[in-house]
Amino acid sequence: MEKLFTVSDNRGHSYQLPLFEDATGWSAKVFDGDTLVGQVHCLKRGEALYLADLHVQEAATHPIQGLAWVRAWLGFDTRGRTESYRNRGLGSALLRFVINRARAGGFRGVTGRLAPIDLKESPTLPDWYQDRGFRVTMAANQLEGALELLLPEAK
């Protein structure tokens, strides 16, 4: 089943966020027009929502359209516009979306894992999650970690 949401970055730009949900969890892909610029995947694990993936594109390429397409067809321009979507607050907006859906779904927390590849690509990721209220527990080798955010019960 697909539902359509929107999220906004800190520049005020809105993005389409189609959400696909089933009994095991849900995933949403973030689009700027026709270009995929981010995604989030969550799994339902008992009383916690497990954040399996949250990613914002460093380099998303927009397809060639209009007159640019004609120039490409004639051989003058073969690349679409490439744009970074990081450092716009889009990841924070996606994380707020996850937390709000977890609360609405009655989950008591949001958990996740920092994989070695995530930390290699973004060494400041533990700080980023801590700044957003998560408890981050790093493994002894500092190459991976666990995330946890407890959600207070509604009164």
Image (cartoon, rainbow, N blue to C red):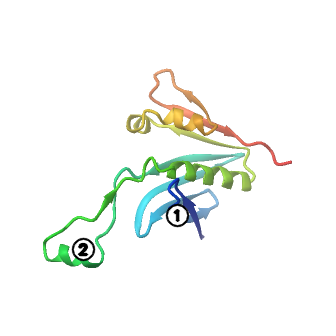
Tag 1 secondary structure: strand
Disc 1 versus disc 2: distance between alpha carbons? 24 Å
Mark 2: amino acid: Ala
In the rendering, at what x and y percent does residue 25 appear? 61, 56
Left or right of 59 in this view: 149: right
- The front one of 147 and 68 is 68
Q: Mark 2 points at which residue?
A: 68
Q: Which of 78 and 139 is in front in this view?
A: 78
Mark 2 element type: helix
Residue closest to the eye, 19 or 100: 100
Which residue is drawn at the image coordinates 43% and 35% (left, top)? 119
Q: Residue at x 61, y 63 (%)?
A: 22
Amino acid type, mark 1: Ser
22 shown above or below 71 = above
**Extreme residue toward the front, this view:** 11
In the displayed structure, 103 sits above or below 142; it is below
Residue 79 x/y as whole percent: 23, 64
**Residue beneath label 1, please?**
14
Quadrant of residue 67 in the image? bottom left
Outermost residue on the top side: it is 140
Give the percent coordinates (x, y) of residue 69: 24, 76
